[in-house]
Image (tube, coloured by chain):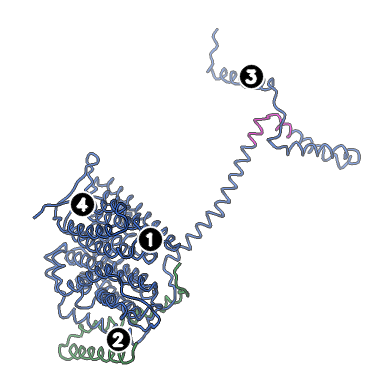
Chain colours: A blue, B green
């Protein structure tokens, strides 16, 4: 056996650096396929308990590679799904920059899951945020640019919270290795930072906002890495936190109801990421006491399976958009005969995500729900079991809607032909794996963090299987009988409407009242400065103007009495006074004579000497 | 959807549910095995209700920005 322990991010980063040298032809395609294979092979050769440590300061080491069962399963699925996405992108991506962004993104995600300390994790976390932004911006449209800005704002906020949490944790404990965090401000900030990536409600809005607006290949890469890295981090640091489990239940239902209402196929899938993340988050949150092993296994198994079926679904919908140029369900339909391979793989992935018996989603969802049923004490188990089971119903509804209205509903006008081979191959591979794991789940059990516990779980226990079949059939029959969930050309507001309204309000506040106040302050300061300048350029002018003003004020009452006599004279005097007052500073003004200036200096010096003498600070020599 | 296909589907599912009900309530006498049907019905009802409520804040259009 080869003892090989090279951090996978190094290979991918080297690949990203080499891409610009290869042009846009065949060499690049071969290189990309080879890179995908090499990455999978590298991760497959990593052994548990191997590591790379980089000392940076006395007592502070960056752990660039820490392989254990949890990080290894993440590495396997990232390398597999990422490799499939690389191959898929060969047909749709022309720009070298987009490949660089995708590879940096994939490499940093692999770096994050193999990081052994918080600082290394943070570095890769930020590289992920910025490289993934490129995948959105390469779409080129204004809506992509705007969504990208919102995306990076969220991730900068999350990254800042994470860094602050890491620093506080380090200051309090003097430990930077990844692990559970003690409650406190740092704990809350870390949870917030990870929560942005995991799409906690209400921090989730960047996900359905940006993913549908990325490039076709970009959406696939995005659906693989960011959120799943967050789940991994959550499992490392916040397992067994009850609030996290409830958040998972809420995400499961929230995501699915918004998915049902969507018309844009990629937006529907994006909301389903939130919903499926709910199962994983709930699994992590439930992981305490006796259910720790089954809950963590369920969560990670669902992450693994989710990457297979969700990547397949995004690839299928990418192929549909590539072939038709349409992304709304109201414009699609009739593609089953025109794109048969895409249709079959999409149906397999839809059955998998819906948890249909015989597919991989059934196995992992069952594990998470089983963990919820095993929870003891209180209503947590009942609430979570209900939420996660109802989430399955909603998932099936939305995927009946997606597959039926994209492929099977009538549409005579649509023109399309099957996607090219490089797009079909990865779709078929991931769809095939969905079936393999569904039929023979022990393949997956062998990879899970708690292998023994996994092998004791029976996915095809009669009562459970029977209940799931009933649930799914009931949902199918009601879906078709009621015909309620047909797509419409409508936009559904999410919480981001409030964020955008608040953002616009904030910008208005900055541009209007705040800027008005700033201008007023600026004018005030300028006036004061101007006054000082005037005074010091001609100190006598000020008192003279005041004396003149006093003179005018004194004379004014007499004007009433002696108007007839004084008026002609006074009128000229007042006119001259106005002229003096309005004399601009730039105009030549009467300068102080040198003699007066010397006199003033001597006067101040004399005053200074007197004060010094009085206080005894100046001693006269006899 | 084709009416024939729809009818066939409804018939098929109805038969399965009836057979399940017979198995659960008469032969095996374990009513808890029937919770899948209840969850299915409750779930569809819940999502219809939520969709109806959320439709109040929907607006016409294809783009979301």
Which is nearer the N-term, disc 3 or disc 2? 2
User: Looking at the rendering, in which quadrant would you find the C terminus of chain A?
Assistant: top right
Q: Is residue A53 above or below residue A354?
A: above
Give the chain of mark 1.
A
- Foreground mark, 4 or 2? 4
Q: Which residue is mark 2?
A: A477
In the image shown, does A399 or A330 lie closer to the viewer? A330
In the image shown, does B55 or A311 lie closer to the viewer? A311
Q: Which residue is mark 3?
A: A602
Between the residue at mark 2 and the residue at mark 1, the CA separation in whole angstroms equals 39 Å
Task: Categorize mark 2 by other alpha carbons within 10 Å: few (<14), some (14-19), many (20+).
Answer: many
In the image shown, does A323 or A107 lie closer to the viewer? A323
On the same chain, marks 3 and 1? The answer is yes
In the image shown, does A211 or A167 lie closer to the viewer? A211
- Foreground mark, 4 or 3? 4
Specify the segment rendered in magenta: A531-545
| Residue A373 appears in the picture as rendered | no
Which is nearer the N-term, disc 4 or disc 2? 4
Q: Which residue is mark 4?
A: A7
Q: Secondary structure at mark 1?
A: helix
Q: Which residue is mark 1?
A: A136
Residue A105 figure quarter: bottom left
Which is nearer the N-term, disc 2 or disc 1? 1
Q: Is residue A612 above or below residue A344?
A: above
């Amino acid at each position: 056996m080869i003892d090989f322990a090279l951090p996978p991010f190094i290979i991918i980063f080297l690949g990203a650096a080499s891409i610009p040298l290869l042009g846009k032809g065949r060499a690049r395609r071969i290189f990309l396929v080879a890179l995908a294979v090499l990455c999978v092979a590298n991760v497959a050769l990593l052994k548990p308990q191997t590591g790379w440590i980089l000392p940076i300061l006395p007592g502070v080491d960056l752990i660039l590679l820490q392989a254990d069962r949890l990080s290894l399963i993440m590495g396997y699925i990232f390398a597999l799904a990422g490799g499939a996405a690389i191959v898929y992108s060969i047909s749709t991506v022309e720009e070298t920059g987009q490949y660089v962004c995708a590879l940096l993104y994939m490499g940093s995600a692999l770096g994050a899951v193999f990081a052994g300390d918080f600082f290394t994790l943070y570095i890769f976390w930020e590289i992920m945020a910025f490289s993934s932004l490129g995948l959105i911006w390469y779409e080129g449209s204004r809506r992509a640019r705007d969504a990208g800005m919102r995306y990076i704002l969220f991730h900068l906020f999350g990254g800042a919270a994470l860094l602050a949490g890491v620093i506080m944790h380090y200051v309090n404990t003097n430990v930077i290795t990844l692990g559970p965090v003690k409650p406190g401000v740092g704990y809350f900030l870390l949870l917030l930072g990870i929560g942005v990536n995991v799409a906690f409600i209400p921090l989730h809005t960047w996900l359905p906002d940006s993913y549908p607006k990325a490039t076709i290949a970009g959406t696939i890469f995005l659906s693989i890495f960011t959120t799943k890295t967050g789940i991994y981090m959550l499992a490392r640091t916040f397992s067994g936190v009850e609030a996290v489990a409830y958040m998972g239940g809420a995400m499961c239902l929230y995501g699915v109801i918004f998915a049902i209402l969507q018309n844009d196929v990629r937006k529907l899938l994006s909301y389903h990421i939130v919903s499926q993340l709910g199962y994983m988050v709930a699994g992590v949150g439930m992981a305490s006491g006796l259910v720790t092993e089954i809950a963590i296994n369920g969560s990670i198994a669902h992450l693994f399976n989710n990457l297979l079926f969700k990547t397949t679904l995004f690839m299928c919908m990418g192929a549909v958009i590539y072939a038709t140029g349409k992304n709304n369900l109201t414009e699609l339909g009739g593609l089953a005969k025109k794109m048969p391979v895409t249709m079959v793989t999409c149906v397999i992935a839809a059955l998998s995500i819906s948890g249909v018996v015989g597919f991989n989603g059934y196995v992992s969802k069952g594990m998470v729900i089983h963990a919820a049923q095993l929870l003891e004490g209180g209503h947590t188990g009942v609430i979570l079991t209900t939420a996660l089971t109802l989430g399955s119903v909603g998932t099936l509804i939305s995927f009946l809607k997606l597959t039926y209205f994209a492929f099977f509903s009538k549409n005579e006008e649509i023109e399309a032909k099957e996607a090219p081979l490089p797009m079909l191959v990865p779709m078929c591979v991931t769809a095939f794996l969905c079936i393999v794991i569904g039929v023979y789940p022990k393949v997956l059990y062998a990879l899970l963090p708690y292998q023994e516990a996994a092998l004791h779980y029976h996915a095809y226990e009669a009562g459970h299987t029977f209940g799931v079949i009933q649930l799914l059939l009931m949902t199918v029959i009601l879906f078709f009988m009621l015909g309620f969930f047909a797509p419409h050309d409508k936009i559904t507001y999410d919480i981001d409407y409030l964020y955008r309204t608040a953002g616009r309000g904030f910008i208005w506040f900055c541009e209007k009242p705040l800027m008005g106040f700033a201008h007023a302050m600026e004018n005030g300061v300028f006036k004061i400065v101007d006054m000082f300048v005037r005074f010091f350029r001609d100190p006598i002018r000020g008192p003279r103007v005041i004396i003149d003003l006093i003179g005018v004020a004194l004379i004014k009452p007499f004007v009433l009495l002696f108007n007839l006599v004084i008026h002609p004279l006074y009128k000229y005097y007042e006119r001259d006074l106005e002229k003096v007052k309005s004399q601009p500073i730039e105009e030549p003004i009467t300068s102080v004579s040198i003699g007066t200036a010397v006199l003033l200096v001597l006067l101040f010096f004399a005053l200074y000497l007197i004060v010094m003498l009085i206080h005894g600070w100046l001693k006269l020599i006899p | 959807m084709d009416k024939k296909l729809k009818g066939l589907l409804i018939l098929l599912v109805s038969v399965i549910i009836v057979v399940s009900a017979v198995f659960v309530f008469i032969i095996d006498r374990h009513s808890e095995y029937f919770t899948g049907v209840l969850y299915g019905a409750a779930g569809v009802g819940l999502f219809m209700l939520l969709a109806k409520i959320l439709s109040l804040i929907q607006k016409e259009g294809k783009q979301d920005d």
